[in-house]
Image (cartoon, coloured by chain):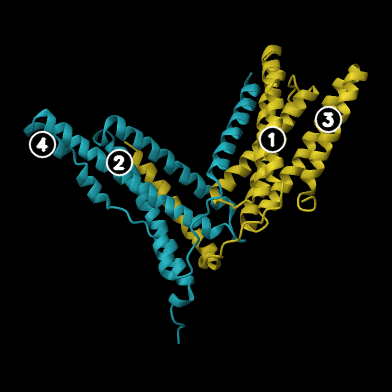
Amino acid sequence: MIPALFSIVIGVLLLAFLTHWALRGSSSVPVAGSSPTDTSKALRLELPSADLIERLLDPRDLAFVRKESPAETVRLFEQERRALAISWLRHTRRQVGRLMSYHVGAVRQNINLRPALEIQLGLYYVRFLVLYELILALSYIRGPYQIRLMMGYVVGVTTQLRGVSDKLLGAAQFSTPASAPPPTQ
Amino acid sequence: MLKRFPIFYGYVACVLVRDVSAIPIYRMWPGVYGPFYWSTAFVTAILGYAVILEIYSRSLARFPGVARLIRIVLVGLLFLVAVRAFAELFGGAANPLASSAALLERDLRTLQAVLLGALLCIFSFYRIPIGKNLRGIIVGYTLYVGVRVIELTAYTQLGKATGIFVSKIEPMSYLICLVVWTVALWSRAPEPIADAVPTIEQDYDPLMRQTRTQLSRACAFLTRTVRP
C-alpha cells in the first residue's frame, strides 16, 4: 500500500508542479544591471530595524492599553499592531524575494555555478518561505503579540540575509571595473 | 522541427506505429494483444527517458551552470533508485524490481515523474526561459506521465474496480496531450533571447564562499534563536 501511495503522491505532485509552472508563464527574472548602482539597488535589503520591530510589538504597550483603556480601544490597538506586523512581514518577503531573484539572474548563466551551494541556498530560501507563511497565518489567527518569539526568529533570518547581501554587494562592486580600487603603486 | 526535436518526433512515431498496429492485433489475435501491449509500453517508457534527455539538453543549452546542477540532481536521483532496486533484489522482497510488466512500467514512469518534477522545480526556481515549442512538449509529456503513474498505480495496486475507473482518464489525458503538442508544434517559434551576462559573473567563487559562510552562521544563529 505504501508504494502505491508513494506513486500516487508523486503523480499528483507532478501534475500540481506542472500546473504551477505552466500558469506562471515565462516571466523573466530582473536581469542584473550593468552599472554599480543597479547592482547595489538589487542586492541591498531595505528592511526596518529589529529594534523598531521590538518596540512595535512591545508587550508592555499592550499591557498599558489593557490597563488604561476600554475594550474597544484595546481591540483597535491590537488591530493596528497586527496590520503593521503583517505589513512588515510582507515587506520582508518582497525584499528577500527580490534578493533571490537577483541571485538567480546573476548565477543561472554562470559556468562556475556550484550545485551543492545552490541547493543549500535553495533549501534555506524554502525554509524562510515556510516560516514566513506560518508566521503570516499565525498573525492573522492569533495576533502578533502571541508569536513574538517567532517574530524574533524572522528578524534573525532577515538580519543574516542582509549580511549575505552586503557581502554580495561588496564583491559585486569590487568586480565592476568602474568601482574597482586603484592598483597599488 | 524534426531536426530540432528528433528524439521527441521519434518517440511520437513509435507511439503512433504501436497504436496503429495494436488495432488489428486486438481484432485478429486477441490472445497476443496483452503481451504486445505491455512489451511495447515498456519500450515507449524507455524511450521516454530519451525525451527527458532532449528536454534537458534543449532547455539548458545556454545555461551550463544550471545544466550541471540538474545533472547532479538527476544522477543523485538515479543513484537512489538504483540503491532501492538493489535492496529489493537482494533483500528478498516479494516483488524484486517488478514482477509484472505493469509494475515495471509503473516504476519506470514513477522515476520519470520524479525526474520531470526535479526539472520543473529547477526551471521554476531559475526561471529558465523556454520557447513555445519546447514548452508544449514539456507540458504534454509531463501531463501524460503524471496521469500514467496514477493510472498504473491504481491498476496494479488499488484493485480492479479502481483501476478500470482510473483507466478511463488516460484516453482523455492522451487526447489533451496530443492537442497541446499539435498547438505548440504547429509552427516554429523563436528561441527566447538570452539575457545579458551579469557583471558579478567573474566573482562567483568568492561570492559563493562568502554566502556559504554567512549561511552557516545564519543557521547557527537561528538554532540559537528558536531555543527556548
Q: How crowded is the residue under tag 1: few (<14 C-alpha within 10 Å), some, or many (20+)?
A: many
Residue at screen point 62% across, 25% down = A8
- Closer to us: mark 4 or mark 2? 2
Q: What is chain A's hue in the picture?
A: cyan
Question: Whole-Å distance between the Cαs marked 3 and 1?
Answer: 15 Å
Which residue has dot 4 on it? A64
Checking the image for residue B89, the label placed there is none
Pair 2/3: label in front? 3
Residue B22 in sight here: yes
* Amino acid type indicated by mark 2: Ile
| Residue designated by label 1 | B177
Element class at badge 1: helix
Of pointers 4 and 2, the one earlier in the residue sequence: 4
User: In 3D space, how far apart are the residues under numbered discs 4 and 2 (Cα atoms)?
Assistant: 22 Å
Residue pointed to by mark 2: A86
Tell me the element at label 2.
Answer: helix
Q: Residue at x 12, y 28 (%)?
A: A71
Q: State whether discs 2 and 3 lie on one chain.
A: no
Count the numbered circles shown.
Answer: 4
Category of crowding for the residue at label 4, using alpha-carbon neighbours closer than 10 angstroms: few (below 14), some (14–19), many (at least 20): few
According to the rendering, which colour does chain B have? yellow
Relative to B122, B184 lies left or right: right
Q: Secondary structure at mark 3?
A: helix
Residue at far left of view: A68
Please, what is the three-letter code of the amino acid marked with disc 4? Phe
Q: Report the residue marked by disc 3.
A: B19
Disc 1 chain ID: B
Q: Is residue B96 visible?
A: no
User: Which residue is located at x 72 percent, y 43 percent?
Assistant: B52
Image location (x, y in percent) of residue B8: 77, 44
Quadrant for the N terminus of chain A in the image: top right
